[in-house]
Amino acid sequence: MTNWQPTLRGERVTLRPIRADGAASDLDAMHAAASDPEVWAQHSEKNRHERAVFERFFKGAVECGGGLVIVDNATGAVIGSSRYYDWNPADESVVIGYTYLARAYWGGAVNGEVKRLMIAHAFRFARTVWFHVSPGNVRSQRALERIGARFDREQIVPVGGVPSARMIYRVDRG
């Protein structure tokens, strides 16, 4: 049986399932990490820093069954999130995406650690891990290339009801 909401612990961060209910909800902490407009400047939906838009993003993370909070091990602070989605048991593939980090964590080793933890877990069930990236999100493209992901193709998908391009990268279990 697959588990797309594991707890994954690395040297710098821990990923755990998003909590959506009551006082323990991660909504406020996740929004605090996401409230800087620069976090979304290279994403397809650039206004996710706005509370109402972020609440829709949060709801999607909860409903997909694969939403994870990224917690800084040193401080215990929520610093971002990522998710698994579109698990396809027929071809043993899953997508990792919707990842964001608070700006204080850019440029270091955190994003790579998050991706490596998630890929290692995904390979327990999947042969292929896909990543969806906005064409303008050069930071994410370079980060994926650093961990060995390969560009596969570009695709047009609706984002907020508007057709938008996305770049698709892949990593195959070796």
Image: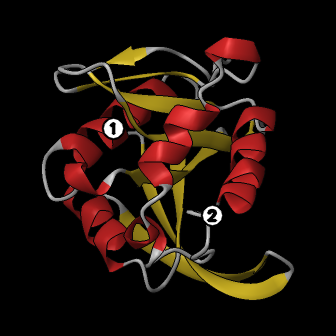
Q: Which residue is mark 2?
A: 50
| 174 to the left or right of 57 | left
Tag 2 or tag 1, which sits nearer the N-term? 2
Query: Measuring 42% from the left and 33% from the top, which residue is drawn there?
Result: 118
Secondary structure, mark 2, is loop
Residue 111 lies, in percent from the top left, at 28, 47
| 149 to the left or right of 16 | left
| 113 to the left or right of 65 | left
Residue 151 lies, in percent from the top left, at 42, 73
Specify few, some or many for label 1: CA neighbours under 10 Å numbering under 14, 14-19, or 20 or more: many
| Residue 113 appears in view | yes
Please state which of residues 104 and 51 is positioned toward the viewer in this rendering: 51
**Where is the N terminus found, in terms of image quarters?**
top right
| 52 to the left or right of 7 | right
Q: Residue 146 appears in which quarter of the rendering?
A: bottom left
Residue 35 vertical position relative to residue 138 in the rendered view, above or below = above
Query: Measuring 25% from the left and 37% from the top, which residue is drawn there?
Result: 113
Q: Amino acid at mark 2?
A: Glu
Please state which of residues 145 and 15 is positioned toward the viewer in this rendering: 15
Q: Which mark is residue 114?
A: 1
Residue 159 vertical position relative to residue 170 in the rendered view, above or below = below
Residue 144 lies, in percent from the top left, at 32, 61
**Where is the C terminus found, in terms of image quarters?**
top left
